[in-house]
Image: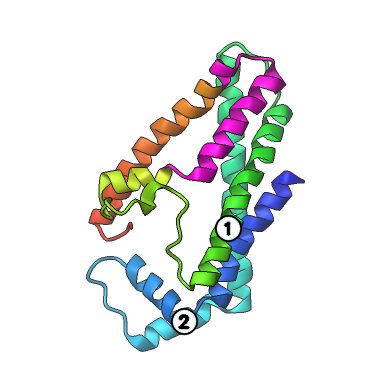
Amino acid sequence: MPFVIFLLVAALAVVLPRLFLPDQVLLDTIQKNLPAQTEVSPEDMEGLLKMMRAPAMLVLNGLGGAFVAGLGTILATLFLWGLFAILGDKPTFLKSLTVVSYTSLIKGLGTVLVIILMLILQRQEVYTSLAVLPFLEPKTYFYNLAAQIDFFTVWRLIVMGFGFAIVLNASKVKSYLSVFVPWILLSVVLAAVMLSLSRFGLGR
């Protein structure tokens, strides 16, 4: 059930902003995400906006959001399942999936909060990470790294480490290190990748 709830939230996170945000907000977001020096006529932008809000496209994008969220949960489960097995524990995939799925509700809560703030503030740039710090400049490495340090992600990892410690009867230090170290390494790599993409006009 937690896994299903998370998938539904992920789908709504894609669909609701497209339905309820003003046209200009969506058009500005489209323009920002276009590759650098790409020119699109106003008529084409309007056509793209109508296509985004078409019922069939909303369904497809909602399913896509759910698929990506589900795939991420499964891959995270497989990674942690294998990591704990290598470290000498004997986890089952089902127990590992249970821990990851229940903690995904924390991420889902963060997603719901972001959706609510988007609709209230009428904008798409809403963050619950350190990217909100005013002294960080967009399209820099440290900005991208700060964007990975999300309050709900850290909260989820803390609960996840505690959950694996209970399920596997392992030490809390070992469980927390097994959860946090890969996340830190992944965040460092993702920040570098996002910086590289931004230089080609494909990132934030």
Magenta-colored span: 149-175
Please name the predominant secondary structure of the magenta segment in the image: helix
Judge the density around disc 2: few (<14), some (14-19), many (≥20) Cα neighbours within 10 Å: some
**Residue that sits furthest to the right in the current view:** 1
**Residue at mark 1:** 113
**Observer-nearest of 69 and 157:** 157
**Observer-nearest of 72 and 106:** 106
Which element type, helix, strand or loop, lies under badge 2?
Answer: helix
Estimate the x, y position of residue 32 in percent, counting from the top left. 33, 68
Q: How many marks?
A: 2
**Residue at mark 2:** 23
Estimate the x, y position of residue 43 in percent, counting from the top left. 38, 88
Q: What's the coloring here?
A: rainbow
Residue 159, relative to residue 24: is it above or below?
above
Q: Quadrant of residue 2?
A: top right
Please check the rendered image and state whether residue 152 is part of the magenta-colored stretch, yes or no: yes
Estimate the x, y position of residue 202 in percent, counting from the top left. 31, 59
Please check the rendered image and state whether residue 144 is part of the magenta-colored stretch, yes or no: no
68 relative to 188 in the view: left or right: right
At 57% across and 76% down in the image, what residue appears? 20
At label 1, the amino acid type is Leu
Residue 52, relative to residue 174: is it above or below?
below
Which element type, helix, strand or loop, lies under badge 1?
Answer: helix
**Residue that sits furthest to the bottom in the current view:** 43
Estimate the x, y position of residue 118 in percent, counting from the top left. 51, 67
